[in-house]
Amino acid sequence: MNAITVKNLKKVYRTHKRGKGMWNAVVSLFNRKYENKHALKGVSFEVEEGEVLGLIGPNGAGKSTTIKALSGILHPTSGDVKVIGYVPWKDRVKYVKHLGVVLGQKEQLWWDLPAIDTFYMNREVYQIPNNKFKRRLNYMVKLLDVKEVINSPVRDLSLGERMKCKLIAALLHSPKVVFLDEPTIGLDIIARDRLRDFVKEVNQKEGTTFIVTTHDMQDIEKLCKRIVIINHGVIVYDGLLEKLKSTILNNKIIDVKFETKVKGFRLKGCKLLEKGDYNFVIEADTKVTKIKKVIDYLLLNYEVADINITDPPIEEIIQRIYKEKKKWVHT
Amino acid sequence: MGSYLALLKGGYKEALQYRFDFVVGLLRVPLTLIIFYFLWKAVFAFNGTDVINGYTFETMIGYYVLSMIVGMFTWMDVDNWLRWDVKSGEVVSEFMRPLNFVFQYLFRQWGMSTLSIFISLVPTFLIGYLFVGLMFFGWLNFVFFTISVVLAMFIVFLITMFIGLLAFWLTDISGLIKVKNMFIAFLSGSLVPLSFFPGIIQKVFAFLPFQYMRYVPVNIYLGIYSVNETLFHLGVMVLWVVVLYIFVHYQSKLALKKMSGVGI
């Protein structure tokens, strides 16, 4: 069943432009030039119940705008959104009871108070039964290892500690749908790992539907089976992460080591990325030359000591999609 | 209701988070009274008369004592919170709670005010009774006064909320807040009793909500109005609360639509 349906979502912002310098600051008081910015140009996708969807794209692609429209804090210019049966920006009060949102760039907790106060406030706001609340709080505090920090004022916490506390605050009321907007931004490796494990566990244990936006491909690889890539306000890829590699990727990276000194290498469809006296790193376009042919060629002509064939890292694939404005096939 | 009380508790804790600032905040009432005391002492001495515009020195200071008491209940900071919340985009937290947007600010404000009212209220009354000859004008007036203070509190809240919500359209409203504070100080009667203004201006004031923020409640306490006049004023206050609430309610809905531009 679909938890989220987005149909042809569009959003046009109006921003005012002004030139640099003190004179233009004065000019803009009297004469303001406005410009329309098309943040979303017709976005459609669906998310199944219990799925963890990765929403990725370069800066300014429209990820956060999408999340905001889904959270009900943004009225789109046109288009339909249904999340667990609600139109987010219409039934706000009823809808947000079932929603948890973590915005990496926003504070969300009461700045001057300890996080525990925000947690207890949420207990009352969402009217969570006391014993259930305590059980859940203890469980999450343990899982994220924040026992030591929840009693200090939020302003004294580190970025990672605050993020973990925000995640707890957003999940205390057992929401059916959770949006995480750059949840690992600025966190160290250990904190990231804990956060991901936490999300994974909540998803598996409770069947919570997640949408995660991030720039960290490890988040995606660890959490999501399916991803939606958005660029310049349109969806350029919607499908399984696994398939992303095979549909878009014809390239293999071949790392070869040799017994004897080697000079050059030339073969149709192959690019020499790195060249040493005893090793090559070759990028082979398998559409032009089959991988078997490349290997055969290498074995035949060189004293090969070792061969390692890998896919280019996911970051590179994503980079390619970002740069090429082409739409990839939906799968 | 329980959900909103959570915000009240939060505001209460917030108010107490910085104890030095909290204590200094408590000094606001006595300090203002001292300033007005010496100011009017000088005015009366310069004038050489015992009565100015119907006020003796004692009744004049009594006016300010009562004005400060009304002011404790009508102290509102929600415009500043909204200014900050909208500019930083943190206002999304308010929209993410399954609660009415306007009421969240009201309850947080109540939480903020509760303790300082609790601490200052009785001492201020005592200062009035013991040192400036403030009198008790009977229970009926006192009940009317209490009702008028509650209504004044709502009027000030709603106007402050109206200014605060403008942040969604104007992004920065710090200048507007200053002007609003000046207007309220002047037009509510917290600076000078409104009877000091020319008659025609007072007639204009009758059509504005400002005089109900301080001047009218104080006069109700002092028994200046007849029972009928008092009831009329209370009725007008209720009307203002209803009108302003309807206005602010729709303004907050429009604000949510407007929010899209803040912090893409």
Image (cartoon, coloured by chain):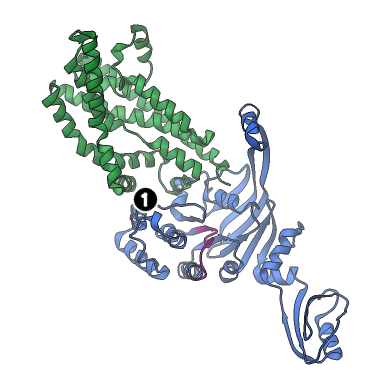
Kind of element beneath mark 1: loop
Give the answer, above or below, for where B208 lies relative to A112.
above
- Tell me if B32 is positioned left or right of B249 in this view: left
**Residue B130 horizontal/vertical position (percent):** 11, 26
Image quadrant where residue B12 sits: top left
- Tell me if A283 is positioned left or right of A93 in this view: right
Image quadrant where residue A30 sits: top right
What residue did someone put label 1 on?
A: A112
Residue sitting at 34 percent across and 42 percent down? B108
Q: Provide the chain ID for the residue under circle 1.
A: A
Residue sitting at 42 percent across and 26 percent down? B180
Q: Amino acid at mark 1?
A: Asp
- Tell which of B249 and A250 is nearer to you: A250
**Residue B6 horizontal/vertical position (percent):** 32, 48
Residue B13 showing in the rendered view:
no
Give the answer, above or below, for where A180 lies relative to A241.
above
- Tell which of A135 and A140 is nearer to you: A140
**Residue A6 horizontal/vertical position (percent):** 61, 53
- Tell me if A133 is positioned left or right of B145 in this view: right
A181 in the magenta segment: yes
Give the answer, above or below, for where A35 lies relative to B225.
below
Image quadrant where residue A269 sits: bottom right
The chain shown in blue is which? A
B106 in the magenta segment: no
Magenta region, residue range: A178-190
| Neighbourhood count class around disc 1 (C-alpha, 10 Å): few under 14, some 14–19, many 20 upward | some
Q: Quadrant of the image for the C terminus of chain A?
A: bottom right
Residue A123 showing in the rendered view:
yes
**Residue B72 horizontal/vertical position (percent):** 27, 32
Q: Colour of chain B?
A: green
- Tell which of A138 and A300 is nearer to you: A300
